[in-house]
Image: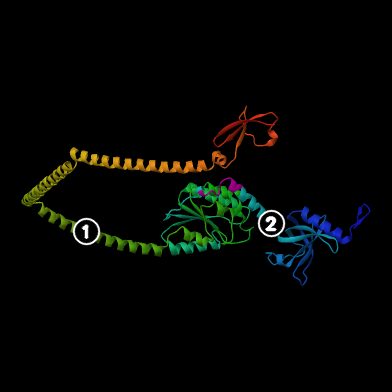
């Protein structure tokens, strides 16, 4: 409302303006705090207060957002909330509209994970060109894992089924806790210095992000990157990803899958051997048959290469060539005679006497045509001349004089006088009639 020079807002308009300013002024942001005064009405929405040791802010999370939460919010829980700042206009309450929520502890670890991942990626530790090839048939497999965990049992079970002939060397380490990252790094370096294996499996079973954190340490990542032995990483379950997965030369979704990926299947190898034996047998038999056929062909050729057979073949070939030569000579002579006769005929038809007669006849013909054309043109010109004379005569002034008219001219300048107004007293004029002229004076 505009009154004199003042703009007056009602409370609803003011709250709407403030809400718009808050919404536009703050981007989507993260807020860390402790949940209190949590309320879950029948609508499915969540209403709570987010606080720290100094301040608090009312917050709301609507049903379509909290249905996707992976945690169960409770009073006293420390959380990370992603949302937008706004205003609940009916009460004028400043609040945070939450769109996502996660446990603050997990969120901190996740941020550390993403930061280290970016750092190592920028340093080239994940580069594809650095990935090593795995041997098709490993001579010995090194396994870096806990000697008492489920992962080693799964790996041994797979290897005993698929490749029982391949020896295994276990490097026992802790896979959880503060000391585990040093043990894992040491085991990788020791395996490289021992040179007793040609491939390494780094494995452990599933767990929370805290449980798997040993495989997100920078020292472990660098030890894997500097390893001369190819490393396959089978840590956690299929949905779990660690820094070690990105640095490893190959990632497996589980420890069992890692053992399967780097070993050939014994049953498949036996099948391949049987098929190879069958192929070799068929190939050898086929080669023997081909050699026998070739031998028989060589014997037949040897019979054909006898001197007597050669002489007979050459004599027959000589007779054939002689016959062909005679036939060729006869054809050439006949062709030359035909050409000579054609030339004689053409020479007779193209003698100078005949040509001269033809040219004289043509000259006489064109002379006659020229005379006819000239006569015709003269007649046409005479006729046109008569027509044009008649037309000229029809418009001649003399014809007008024949009818009794006269032409008056000034005697001095001989200009025609066509108007009385141009005459002057005592002016001398010449009057022309059809049969002559007469001098006159104007009175």
| Residue 18: quarter of image | bottom right
Can you give x and y, in whole percent of width and height, for residue 411 in the image?
62, 28
| Residue 441: quarter of image | top right
CA gap, disc 2 to disc 1? 74 Å
> Mark 2 or mark 1: which is in front?
1
Front one among 360 and 414:
414
Front one among 345 and 17:
345
Mark 2 residue element: helix
Q: Height in image: 163 above or below 182? A: below
The circle on residue 107 is: 2
The circle on residue 290 is: 1
Can you give x and y, in whole percent of width and height, for residue 82 in the image?
72, 58
> Where is the N terminus found, in terms of image quarters?
bottom right
Residue 175 lies left or right of residue 50; in this view the side is: left
Can you give x and y, in whole percent of width and height, for residue 432 in the image?
58, 34
Front one among 28 and 213:
28
10 Å crowding of disc 2: few (<14), some (14-19), many (20+): some
Mark 1 residue element: helix
Residue at x-position 51% and y-position 63%? 154
The circle on residue 90 is: none
Can you give x and y, in whole percent of width and height, for residue 191 in the image?
50, 50
Residue at x-position 41% and y-position 41%? 382
10 Å crowding of disc 1: few (<14), some (14-19), many (20+): few
Residue at x-position 33% and y-position 61%? 276
Residue at x-position 18% and y-position 38%? 353
Of all residues shown, which one is farthest toward the top?
412
> Where is the C terminus found, in terms of image quarters?
top right
Q: Earlier in the sequence, mark 2 or mark 1?
A: 2
Q: Height in image: 194 above or below 203? A: above
Q: Which residues are magenta?
A: 119-128
Total numbered labels: 2
Q: Is residue 217 magenta?
A: no
């Amino acid at each position: 409302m505009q009154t004199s020079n003042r703009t007056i807002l009602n409370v609803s308009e003011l709250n709407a303006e403030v809400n718009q300013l808050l919404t536009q002024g703050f981007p989507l942001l993260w807020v860390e705090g402790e949940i209190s005064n949590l309320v879950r009405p029948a609508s499915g929405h969540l209403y709570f207060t987010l606080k720290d040791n100094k301040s608090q802010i009312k917050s709301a999370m609507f049903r379509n957002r909290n249905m996707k939460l992976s945690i169960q919010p409770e009073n006293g829980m420390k959380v990370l909330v992603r949302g937008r700042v706004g205003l609940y206009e009916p009460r004028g309450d400043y609040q945070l509209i939450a769109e996502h929520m996660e446990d603050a502890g997990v969120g901190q670890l996740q941020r550390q994970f993403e930061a280290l991942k970016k750092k190592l990626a920028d340093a080239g530790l994940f580069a594809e060109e650095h990935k090593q090839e795995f041997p098709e048939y490993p001579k010995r497999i090194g396994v870096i894992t806990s000697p008492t965990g489920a992962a080693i049992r799964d790996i041994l079970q797979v290897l005993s089924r698929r490749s029982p002939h391949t020896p295994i060397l276990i490097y026992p380490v802790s896979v959880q806790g503060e000391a585990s990252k040093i043990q894992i790094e040491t085991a990788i370096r020791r395996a490289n210095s021992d040179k007793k294996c040609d491939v390494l499996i780094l494995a452990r079973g599933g767990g929370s992000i805290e449980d798997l954190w040993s495989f997100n340490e920078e020292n472990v990542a660098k030890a894997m990157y500097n390893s001369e032995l190819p490393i396959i990483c089978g840590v956690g379950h299929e949905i779990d990803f660690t820094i070690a997965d990105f640095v490893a030369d190959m990632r497996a979704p589980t420890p069992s899958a890692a053992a399967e990926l780097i070993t050939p299947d014994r049953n498949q190898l036996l099948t391949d051997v049987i098929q190879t034996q069958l192929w070799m047998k068929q190939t050898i038999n086929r080669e023997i048959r081909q050699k026998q056929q070739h031998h028989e062909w060589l014997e037949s050729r040897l019979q054909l290469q006898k001197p007597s057979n050669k002489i007979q073949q050459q004599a027959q070939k000589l007779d054939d060539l002689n016959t062909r030569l005679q036939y060729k000579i006869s054809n050439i002579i006949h062709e030359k005679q035909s050409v000579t006769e054609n030339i004689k005929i053409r020479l007779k038809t193209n003698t100078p006497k005949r040509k001269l007669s033809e040219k004289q006849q043509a000259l006489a013909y064109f002379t006659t045509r020229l005379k006819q054309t000239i006569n015709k043109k003269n007649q046409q010109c005479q006729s046109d001349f008569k027509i044009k004379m008649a037309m000229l005569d029809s418009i001649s002034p003399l014809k007008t004089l024949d009818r009794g008219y006269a032409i008056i001219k000034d005697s001095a300048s001989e200009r025609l006088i066509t108007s009385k107004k141009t005459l002057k007293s005592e002016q001398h004029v010449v009057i022309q009639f059809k049969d002559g002229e007469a001098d006159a004076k104007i009175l």
